[in-house]
Amino acid sequence: MATRTQSTSRTGNQSRTTGRSAAGSKSTSASRTASKTSNSSRSMSSRGKNGDMNSRFHQLFMDQLKDIYWAEKHLLKALGKMQKAATSEELVDAIAHHQDQTREHVNRLERVFESLGQTPKAKKCPAMEGLIAEGQDVMDDTEEHSAVRDAGLIICSQKIEHYEIATYGSLRTLAEKMGHEDAARLLDQTLSEEKETDVVLTQLAESSINEEAAAE
Ligand SMILES: [Fe+2]
Ligand SMILES: [Fe+2]
């Protein structure tokens, strides 16, 4: 299951690639639409250092910010439930730490919105909703106080971390591209914390919980 390299560097690289390819495909589609609407000046200005706050590219960035804002807020509630369902003391502590971190991620996203002169808004994130539902499935399908349940909770937590890593990596890249330096710095800070949590979860699974689960 959880492997160290998959959880960290590779995902980080993919995140950067995702950000770039999203930019590339959007710019292709934007220029296609721009030629239809004869709005090529807007398309060009979106490539400027500070971006164009009204460009489609910027709109994409804002939509993705709203998505992760919703995701972090909902995760905050779900982590409380996951923490209560966990048995291993180390896992309980790790989930509690993740919850504190997530609270800070919500606050930090609010600062990102503010740095862009925007009011924080959430937009439903179906991916996080599904990942949280998977966590619920694990709790429903495993025995209380079992290491198997703990192992399942770690898998679900790492799926969540990887979603967050992909999102923050892409958003950081987009913010850099648009010249939103404060936003890029804040997003990068959260990205680093998501990666750290992922590593902690991998270590926890590999050092004890998977072995205990195998012995049950
Ligand atoms: Fe987070
Ligand atoms: Fe996280």
Image (cartoon, rainbow, N blue to C red):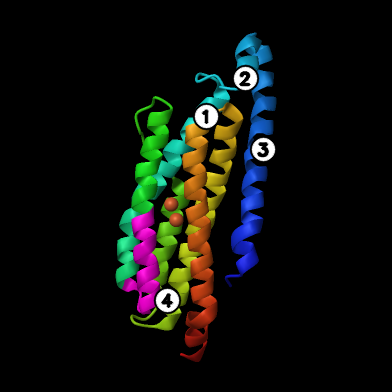
* Residue 8 included in the magenta stretch of the image: no
| 3 vs 4, front mark | 3
Residue depicted at x 47% and y 65%: 156
The amino acid at mark 3 is Arg
| Alpha carbons under labels 2 and 3: distance apart | 16 Å
| Alpha carbons under labels 4 and 2: distance apart | 49 Å
| Alpha carbons under labels 3 and 4: distance apart | 36 Å
Magenta range: 85-101
* Residue 90 included in the magenta stretch of the image: yes
Q: Give whichever of 65, 200 is nearer the camera.
A: 200
Residue denoted by label 2: 48
Please tell me whether mark 4 sits on a helix, a strand or a loop: helix
The mark found on residue 13 in the picture is none
| Alpha carbons under labels 4 and 1: distance apart | 40 Å
The amino acid at mark 2 is Gly
Please tell me whether mark 3 sits on a helix, a strand or a loop: helix
